[in-house]
Image: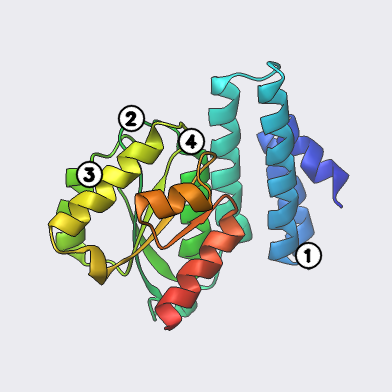
Amino acid sequence: MDDKLIAAVEQLNEDKVFKLVEKRLKAGKDPVYLQEQIRLGMLKVGILYEKGEYFIADLIMAGEIVKNVLKIILAKPEDQHHNKTGTILLGTVQGDLHDIGKNIFASMVEAEGFEVIDLGIDVPPEEFVVKTKEIQPQIIAMSGVLTLALESMKKTVAALTAAGLRDQVKILIGGNPVNRISCDYIGADAFTNNTDEGVTYCKNWVAG
């Protein structure tokens, strides 16, 4: 375990995080290992938030640090991106403004060669439908942290079904309130609270 890197993330020390990551990459550390240390640091940030020692602004800052450092950790040579793995339509559903988990997931699947169309936050069902018709993604990934996001996810799946698009895509949902019961209720193909697991689902789906 890399205590220095984990602590730098926990302390929201962006300069130190970048310096430590660059140093370890030059020393030949496995990007997957570094990614795990960043995740452990983010867990500590979440704990501090739950204790009331960190606030929403701190979570946003942590999310930006992670998003930027993942671009370095997960960077691949340009020639490895000629063959696109697939297309993912991504968004935080209507009524929810959280995007840290969404952004981390986007960085990770992009590193695997996926094209990611990120609709952002507070995305209504109709926007998912319109964009699905336009770009015809293989996967739709919906994110939400608030409990109300579950209803928005269900409405989005219902809208895709009504538009005759449901059978054309795989739907992945992620965020704090999702579980097997809510996944079945929403009508998604899979759920996850783990970005690595989410990436694995997407890779398996496009691999057939």
Residue 122, image x, y percentages = 31, 34
Circle nearer the N terminus (4, 2): 2
Q: Which residue is mark 4?
A: 145
Counting residues from the start of the chain, the first of labels 2 and 3 encountered is: 2
Q: Nearer the viewer, residue 137 or 111?
A: 137
Which residue is the extreme one toward the top? 52
SS assignment at label 2: loop
Q: Kindly report the distance in space between the C-alpha atoms of the residues bearing marks 3 and 4.
A: 17 Å
Mark 1: secondary structure:
loop
Residue at numbered disc 2: 95
Q: Is residue 200 left or right of residue 82?
A: right
Real-space CA distance between mark 4 and mark 2, rounded to the nearest whole angstrom: 10 Å
Residue nearest the viewer, comparing 96 with 165: 165
What's the distance in space between the residues labelled 1 and 2, CA to CA?
40 Å
Which residue does the numbered mark 1 point to in the structure image?
29
On screen, residue 160 above or below 151: below
Please give the residue where the numbered disc 3 appears in the rendered image: 125
How busy is the neighbourhood of tag 4: few (under 14 within 10 Å), some, or many (20 plus)? many
